[in-house]
Image (cartoon, rainbow, N blue to C red):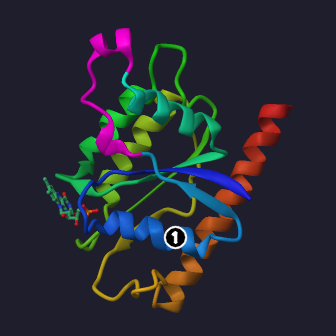
Amino acid sequence: MKTITVLVGSLRKDSVNRTFAQALEKLAADKFRFVFPDLGAVPHYNEDLWQDLPQSVSTLKRQIEEGDGVLFVTPEYNRTFAPLLANAIAWASRPYGKSSFMNKPGAVIGTSPGAIGAAAGQMHLRALLPVVGVIQLGQPEVYLQWKPGIVDADLAFTDATTREFLTKFINAFDTFIDRTALDEAA
Ligand SMILES: Cc1cc2nc3c(=O)[nH]c(=O)nc-3n(C[C@H](O)[C@H](O)[C@H](O)COP(=O)(O)O)c2cc1C
């Protein structure tokens, strides 16, 4: 069982990205245990706060470091990724040389009611992650258009094709984490 730190870029109570992450957690229950850091508790990035580091930040860094992998789940805002994620990533990437993401296997997914399924937002995030040390899964990309009923009240994906596709993603991420660990050990 692998522990995946899941960073969801929305604080909204009815966030489709959070629901997506929770449904994926259920689909991946035989492989992954998801940990959801409280990104809403993390203050806006301010260099001065390192003098007396807020506990929310040290907890975030620890949760990322302890995980076997990190999953970024982003809404698309104005064709880029969510500012909540930008803030969390800034904190976790510092102090310089001590990024919590260093050599961590990571993957990006996201959903939007729009037809491109947060693809543009994800691309910006994918460009950023190597800078902070994430070793990134390339395929499969997950651009999910969120439609009413895509997930039922028990957080199960209702469509078999979607379920199959997301199972492929889960298996690919699982294998990728194993491969990255082997590379690190070598
Ligand atoms: C500031 C803002 C910008 C947005 N820009 C986009 C966009 O570029 N593309 C898109 O598909 N949806 C866009 N949306 C709609 C979001 O995809 C939609 O609100 C979605 O439900 C947000 O994710 P969440 O439900 O997880 O909070 C935008 C929403 C907001 C609030």
Q: Quadrant of the C terminus?
A: top right
Q: Is residue 156 above or below residue 118?
A: below
Q: Residues within 10 Å of mark 1 (few under 14, many from 20)?
A: many
Q: Left or right of 71: which side holds 168?
A: right
- Closest to the observer, 53 or 166: 53
Q: Is residue 97 above or below residue 41?
A: above
The extreme right residue here reads 186
Q: Residue at label 1?
A: 24
The extreme left residue here reads 78
- Closest to the observer, 21 or 57: 57
Q: Position of residue 44 (x, y in %)?
A: 24, 29
* 143 is within the stretch colored magenta: no
Q: Left or right of 92: which side holds 16?
A: left
Looking at the rendered structure, the number of numbered marks drawn on it comes to: 1
For ligand 1, which image quadrant applies? bottom left
Residue span colored magenta = 38-53
Q: Position of residue 148 (x, y in %)?
A: 28, 86
Mark 1 element type: helix
| Residue drawn at the location 46% of the way across and 85% of the way down | 154
Q: Is residue 54 above or below residue 8?
A: above
| Residue drawn at the location 28% of the way across and 65% of the way down | 15
Quadrant of residue 62 within the rendered picture: top right
Q: Quadrant of the N terminus?
A: bottom right
Q: Left or right of 108: which side holds 30?
A: right
| Residue drawn at the location 36% of the way across and 36% of the way down | 88
- Closest to the observer, 155 or 55: 55
